[in-house]
Amino acid sequence: MLSLLQIENIAVIERSEITFQKGLNVLTGETGAGKSIVMDAISAVLGRRTNRDLIRTGSEKAAVTAVFSAPAASDWYETHGVPYDPEELLIRRELYADGKNVCRVNGAAVTVSVLRALGASLVDIHGQNDTQALFDEKAHLALLDAFADTASEQDAYHSAYVRCTEIRAQLDRVSMDESEKLRRMESLTYQINEITDAKLKAGEEEPLLARRNVLRNAEKLSDGLSEAVKSLYGGESSQGASDLLSAAARELTRLGRVDAKYEEAAQRLSSLIADADSLSEELRSDLDELSYSDEELDRIERRLDLIERLCRKYGKDAAAVLEYAETAQNELEAITTSEERSEALREELRRAEAEAMRLGEILRNKRREGAVLLKERVEDELSQLDMPNIRFSARFTEIPLSDSGIDQVSFYMSANLGEDEKPLNKVASGGELSRVMLALKNVLAENDTVPTMIFDEVDAGVSGRAAQKVAEKLKRSSTGKQVLCVTHLPQIAALADVHFLITKQARDGRTYTQVAPLDRPGRVEELARIIGGSQITENTRKSAEDMLGVS
């Protein structure tokens, strides 16, 4: 149950706090006072789509906080990493002018999609758009499925239908005309042969590039190695580093007989001499082995050019080119055997479609059973809403396999004796449509666990005795669920357990909307206004008193 709603900087509401109660909570006010803004705020905190234009002019941030006294099941909290409080559930959503959203549940951050799913389990909002949706026959099937509880049958059928679409896609890929098949086979054969003839090896370009670099710089390498060896060994006119180190070591050895510390220095030099000799041998060996020719360089250049050309056509490197060749070979084999594959897929599709039809029939039967019961329940509800001669039904039209099943469903009705049933969008007036939607909502509410229902001006086109029936129906609905209702009807307002008045006033060049609960005198005045408009008389007040007296 929604127990508290705090609104900050939402449109013309700078700040407001509304404490809702059990039973029927009614909100009334002049046209344009801000009733729709309260509904927008509730929608926002439940994770529904919002617009940054909802933020009050001049403010960088808007926020809505809601407290529910009937929290979700404890396993939901664990799944989403939200602290569990068995007493209440606190939701807050902040909207920023830069488009950012911050959503928190019991202080823990959640995504808008998680908040939306949670909100759907807490509150069912029904507005005028929902009523107009009855003109769209696509909504009829969803309503029937919700009533008949066909979720498991839908899941089973949908899995089979998806399998059919997957097989059809495979069949499309292997099915092509003969000329297209020949062109593709020629193209694949050429590509495979071109790669095969190249005798590529994965990773072969790296050593080739390294060897090419050596050959291109062979003269530099030869000169450099010669100079390095000469510096270490010495030449005809100069001593090398090894000879100089040996001379220094001999001197330090003699000094070591005088001072022991030079013995360690002599040993260190001996180690350096050994390293220098070893390195000299390695460099001399490299110099001796250094060989190169223009023919080898030309051969490597041609090989690298071939690899580069293939890479431009088939992949980033030799390994990718070989992988492409394998894929092409598989495709060529698949095309070669496409007729056999096509026949196998056609047989598989026949079996999959038969299974989908079987499951579609099960879904259809569950829907038809639900349609019979829905007819009885809706007609009973509508008779209580001053439509005693109503006839209502869900009619089925068989269609080929589709995402939703093998049937289309349309709601038909006749509101008057002697008239044939016709589609809702052909016969229902605005007031009748409002009552049909209210009846459907009440019937569906019997099967769900959502604790709060919100009706936003569902009384459009309803007046007189029908209005009283609608009011009584909402009152009865509120005995098992919390009901919030935005209304223009005095009959509904008079039956409220809690009545809130929404008013608007201008101060200092700005508009401010306030929401406040009414005591009995306040309810009398508001009911008198709804009954008589701006001219409140003693008679309208008396009528208001009379209505409250029987509430």
Image (cartoon, helix red, strand yellow):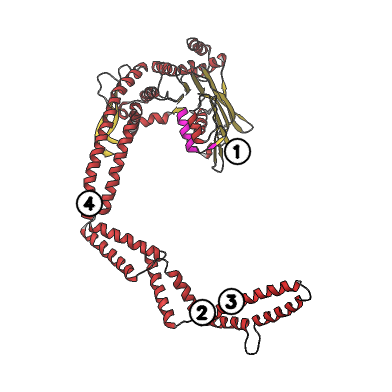
Q: Residue furthest right?
A: 258
Read off the magenta span. 109-122
Secondary structure at numbered mark 2: loop
Q: Is residue 137 visible?
A: no
Along the horizontal axis of the image, is 479 left or right of 99?
left
Secondary structure at numbered mark 3: helix
Q: Residue at x 47, y 34 (%)?
A: 116
Q: What's the amino acid at mark 4?
A: Ser
Q: Position of residue 132 (x, y in %)?
A: 38, 30
Q: Position of residue 183 (x, y in %)?
A: 25, 63
Q: Are dots 3 and 1 in contact, CB under 8 Å? A: no
Label 2 belongs to which residue?
217
Q: Position of residue 513 (x, y in %)?
A: 57, 28
N-terminal of the pair, mark 4 or mark 3, is 3
Q: Is residue 202 visible?
A: yes
Residue 278 disc label: 3
The front one of 143 and 323 is 323
Q: CA distance from mark 2 to mark 1?
A: 70 Å
Disc 4 crowd, CA 10 A, few/some/many (<14, 14-19, 20+) = some
Q: What's the amino acid at mark 3?
A: Ser
The front one of 77 and 364 is 77
N-terminal of the pair, mark 2 or mark 3, is 2
Q: CA distance from mark 2 to mark 3?
A: 25 Å
Label 4 belongs to which residue?
342
Q: What's the amino acid at mark 1?
A: Ser
Q: CA distance from mark 2 to mark 4?
A: 59 Å
Residue 115 lies within the magenta run: yes
Q: Residue at x 71, y 75 (%)?
A: 266
Q: Residue at x 38, y 72 (%)?
A: 306
N-terminal of the pair, mark 2 or mark 1, is 1
